[in-house]
């Protein structure tokens, strides 16, 4: 991982492929597991000054390999320093307290709980601290142009990791990653339609670029590991993509094994999908096109990351529209969050609600989606999901898929609320389902290929919002101000704040393809 400017969380990485296969769980991971460390456990060792000297000297050799593998030019020497576990962990914890991305992720936690993707009692930030501490290993600092080496990991085991990190150094020398990655906005709440669109466009771009950076760095790490056998990714690209899909399956991380599905999938997305994207680019375009070519003309959406050939063909991604709903809401509600409900979001939600078979059927049938969250101005507890009203409009490739999704969503409302009961007496026709819950009514409406969901808004208001949002998709604007919203992304897609934060906070063993 590459650590960005001061506004970014530190880019930390785990033991990567070498650590995962050669040294097993880190000492810190052992301490955080359910079982206490054995009494005869060996104390953590540190590399000797001579080993440190040899490791420092290997940086230039590995940088040359990364440059040859990527065809990215070496424009300057990469600085290097030896750091301790305590220094890395302290920096991580400090950044989690102050970082802009961490604050945005904290805001999104309530919305994730409202959707049922996290339990109401789950505390996200302390869990993430434990998870990241478990697998910290090192980082490339784009601000100081320095690769940080670790004083507690055997030098030979750090070398594949260096191949990954020095790829970030080469990317940085070509692009200036501080500027390239950071779309940069100080505000974290949009208050009108124009700002809604602005936020989503910027953050969708960031998500795609994050996957590009990590996919390229993973590709170099794999090529470096395969080089002694005279092989590379192109020796068997299909096998590499298969291994990418197996990421996390045999993780030895006790904290990650306890993580919700949402967290596991958010962690893996940039590495798994980014690597598969890069494998296809290497196959189709060769090293120059796959590295410099993609950096110079990057994908702008996560849809393109997940569908590399669509990126190559410049396929237009699905687009939904949102009318100006602020006049209906702003008297009693404050804008809280808006975003795309992307294909990865649908896959996670469908797997959590309906299982892997349901996710495999519904995710490819997704054809766009958007959500909007508003907070009651007079809410007694603004840290609770009860303070949030939620709108979610999804579009599907067929009416059958839309009906299947609506059915699944309704059947799993008890994952989001308590006291759920069907209230057929309130349903205006057969297209509606109305439920009463402990947080107010839920309206689910199926209209052709679209499914509209309103949670916690009163039914009269919910129906007005549904008409506005569905009519806009049909071209009936009725004089409303409209913003076009990319329907393919992760940030500001539902899971994107978490995905983005994890990707910028560190690369973990579970994110690496197994051998």
Image: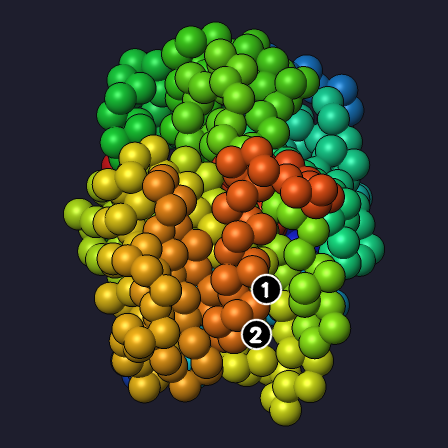
Which one is in front, 443 or 159? 443
Q: Quadrant of the C terminus?
A: top left
37 shown above or below 56:
below
Residue under label 1, please give it: 373
Q: Residue at x 51, y 27 (%)?
A: 317
Q: Residue at x 50, y 18 (%)?
A: 315
Disc 1 residue crowd, few under 14, some 14–19, many 20+, Cα 10 Å? many
Spot occupied by residue 451 in the image (x, y as percentages of width and height): 39, 50
Q: Residue at x 62, y 55 (%)?
A: 338
What secondary structure is found at the residue carrying circle 1? Answer: strand
Marker disc for residue 388:
2
Which one is in front, 225 or 151? 225
Disc 2 residue crowd, few under 14, some 14–19, many 20+, Cα 10 Å? many
291 shown above or below 52:
above
402 shown above or below 379:
above
In the displayed structure, does residue 391 sit left or right of residue 184? left
In the displayed structure, does residue 389 sit left or right of residue 418? right
Spot occupied by residue 274 in the image (x, y as percentages of width and height): 46, 33
Q: Quadrant of residue 83?
A: bottom right
Spot occupied by residue 228 in the image (x, y as percentages of width and height): 35, 22
Which one is in front, 268 or 345? 345
Q: Residue at x 65, y 78 (%)?
A: 376
* Sooner in the amino-acid sequence: mark 2 or mark 1: 1
In the displayed structure, does residue 360 sit left or right of residue 462? left
Alpha carbons under labels 2 and 1: distance apart = 6 Å
Q: Quadrant of the N terminus?
A: top right
285 shown above or below 505:
above
Q: Are marks 2 and 1 in contact (CB under 8 Å)?
A: yes
């Amino acid at each position: 991982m590459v650590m960005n400017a001061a506004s970014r969380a530190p880019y930390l990485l785990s033991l990567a492929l070498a650590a995962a296969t050669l040294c097993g769980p880190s000492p810190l991971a052992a301490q955080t597991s359910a079982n206490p460390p054995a009494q005869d456990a060996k104390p953590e060792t540190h590399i000797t000054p001579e080993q440190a000297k040899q490791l420092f000297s290997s940086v230039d050799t590995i940088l040359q390999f990364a440059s040859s593998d990527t065809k990215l030019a070496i424009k300057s020497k990469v600085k290097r320093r030896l750091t301790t576990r305590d220094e890395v962990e302290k920096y991580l914890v400090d950044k989690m307290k102050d970082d802009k991305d961490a604050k945005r992720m904290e805001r999104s936690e309530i919305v994730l709980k409202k959707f049922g993707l996290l339990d109401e009692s789950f505390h996200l930030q302390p869990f993430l601290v434990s998870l990241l501490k478990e697998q910290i290993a090192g980082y490339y600092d784009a601000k100081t142009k320095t690769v940080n080496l670790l004083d507690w990991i055997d030098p030979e085991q750090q070398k594949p990791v260096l191949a990954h990190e020095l790829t970030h150094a080469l990317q940085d020398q070509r692009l200036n990653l501080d500027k390239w990655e950071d779309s940069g906005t100080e505000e974290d709440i949009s208050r009108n339609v124009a700002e809604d669109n602005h936020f989503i466009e910027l953050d969708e771009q960031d998500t795609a670029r994050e996957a590009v950076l990590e996919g390229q760095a993973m590709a170099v790490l794999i090529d470096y590991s395969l080089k002694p056998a005279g092989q590379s990714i192109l020796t068997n690209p299909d096998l590499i993509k298969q291994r990418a899909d197996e990421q996390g399956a045999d993780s030895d991380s006790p904290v990650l094994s306890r993580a919700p599905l949402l967290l596991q999938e958010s962690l893996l997305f940039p590495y798994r999908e980014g690597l598969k994207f890069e494998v296809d680019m290497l196959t189709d375009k060769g090293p120059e096109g796959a590295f410099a070519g993609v950096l110079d003309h990057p994908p702008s959406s996560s849809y393109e990351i997940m569908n590399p050939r669509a990126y190559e063909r410049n396929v237009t991604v699905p687009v939904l529209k949102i009318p100006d709903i602020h006049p209906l809401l702003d008297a009693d509600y404050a804008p809280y969050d808006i975003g795309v409900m992307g294909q990865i979001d649908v896959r996670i939600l469908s797997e959590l609600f309906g299982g892997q078979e349901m996710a495999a059927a519904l995710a490819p049938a997704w054809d766009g989606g958007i959500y909007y969250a508003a907070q009651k101005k007079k809410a007694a507890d603004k840290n609770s999901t009860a303070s949030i009203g939620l709108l979610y409009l999804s579009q599907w490739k067929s009416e059958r898929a839309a009906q299947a999704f609506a059915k699944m969503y309704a059947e799993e409302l008890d994952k989001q609320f308590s006291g759920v009961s069907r209230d057929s007496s309130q349903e205006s026709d057969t297209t509606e389902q109305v439920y009463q819950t402990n947080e107010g009514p839920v309206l689910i409406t199926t209209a052709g290929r679209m499914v509209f969901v309103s949670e916690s808004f009163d039914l009269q208001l919910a129906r007005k919002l549904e008409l506005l949002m569905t009519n806009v998709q049909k071209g009936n604007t009725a004089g409303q101000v409209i913003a076009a919203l990319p329907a393919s992304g992760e940030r500001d897609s539902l899971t994107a704040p978490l995905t983005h934060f994890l990707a910028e906070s560190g690369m973990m063993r579970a994110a690496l393809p197994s051998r």
